[in-house]
Image: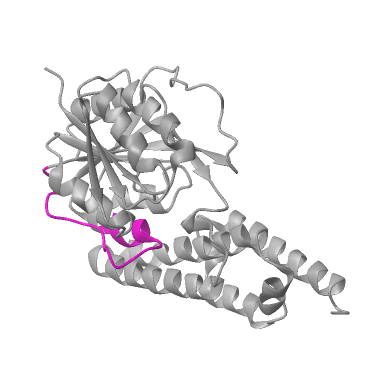
Amino acid sequence: MSALVSIIVPVYNTAKYLDRCLLSVTKQTYKNLEILLIDDGSTDNSGLICEEWSKKDNRIQVIHQQNKGISAARNLGFRTIVGKYVTTLDSDDHLYLNAIEYAERALEETSSDVAAFKLKYTFNQKMPKKLFKAKKKLKYFVKEGKEIHEQIFLSMDYQTFFWNKMFKSTTIKGIYQDENLRRFEDIESLPRFLKVCNKAVFLKHTLINYMIRNDSLSHDTSDIKKKLDLLTSLCTLNENRYKEWYPSFGEDFHYWWALEYMFIHIDHIKGMSRKEKQSIFFDDTILEQYIIHSKGFIHSPYKFWYKLLYLKLKISIFFFKIKNKKH
């Protein structure tokens, strides 16, 4: 008999996208599912939509709670699920229709503790009209110990998101996300979850469609300095963790988070007002900070991306100053 796979879907004010998300879950080619919808105090119709879906599919269980954040919603899911394997899905994203089938099979065939799969980015609500399957034959490779962390943090393929991973439930039992964090919760928690995994299987397939929305919390452009300061503190925490766990990788981890710092900064530039841009771009210490944050970057696996992003920032700042020098 096939293993029961639990899918935790935290839901908060995503009524516009929720039907598509849940359609991708309920139409999975893998049928032995426990689908747990955690309504995190939604103020739109999301809670009602969850209830309607539970009436249509008896694999769906709905739990309503006061708004506590995505980490608290996921943690409630971790405490509730009974499946052999567990994965999470954000309620504005959607799975490829054979995502669970491929991930479960890879875990079973390799006796791994965690499976990771690739993702596709979709910007500003432009989701494809159809739901797709991964068409190629299942392919994967296996890593163990320190190499798991290197594959996640020192490559661009599998990222540090929680929702493109499927864990063996008993392996991560008793480990939870930090509920005090409302941003970057995956960056803080993923190393702790991976640390208890002896073996990981990495699928060579894109199995999830990730929507990047300007109105989502993770892409909110307000108070960017506070946001980047938090990122810096969390990544420094992880750098110190890895120096203790795997000393050589601890040094390499610095390169990853310096790159992440730059990516997030650039990602927010498009959504900033002119006044917000002025406060950052007319502060000449910004480029100095990138140099400090990225010491030795030229020797890292990310040297191409660092050069490209650094150049893009310099050009952006240069033209912004020319355009706004009269203001």
Please provide percent x and percent y for residue 94: 43, 33
Residue displayed at 19% across by 51% down: 76
Question: Quick check: 144 left or right of 22?
Answer: left
Please provide percent x and percent y for residue 90: 38, 43
Query: What color scheme is it?
Result: one colour
Please provide percent x and percent y for residue 209: 47, 35
The image quadrant that residue 133 belongs to is: top left
Residue reaching furthest right?
326
Q: Is residue 231 above or below residue 81?
A: below
In this view of the protein, which residue sits in the foreground, 2 or 148?
Answer: 2
Q: Is residue 142 above or below residue 323?
A: above
Please provide percent x and percent y for residue 167: 22, 41
* Residue 261 in view of the camera: yes
Q: Is residue 212 above or below residue 295?
A: above
Residue displayed at 84% across by 74% down: 324
Residue displayed at 39% across by 17% down: 137
Q: Magenta includes 41?
A: no
Q: Main secondary structure of the magenta part?
A: loop
Q: Quadrant of the N terminus?
A: top left
Q: Quadrant of the C terminus?
A: bottom right
Write down the region rendered in magenta: 170-191
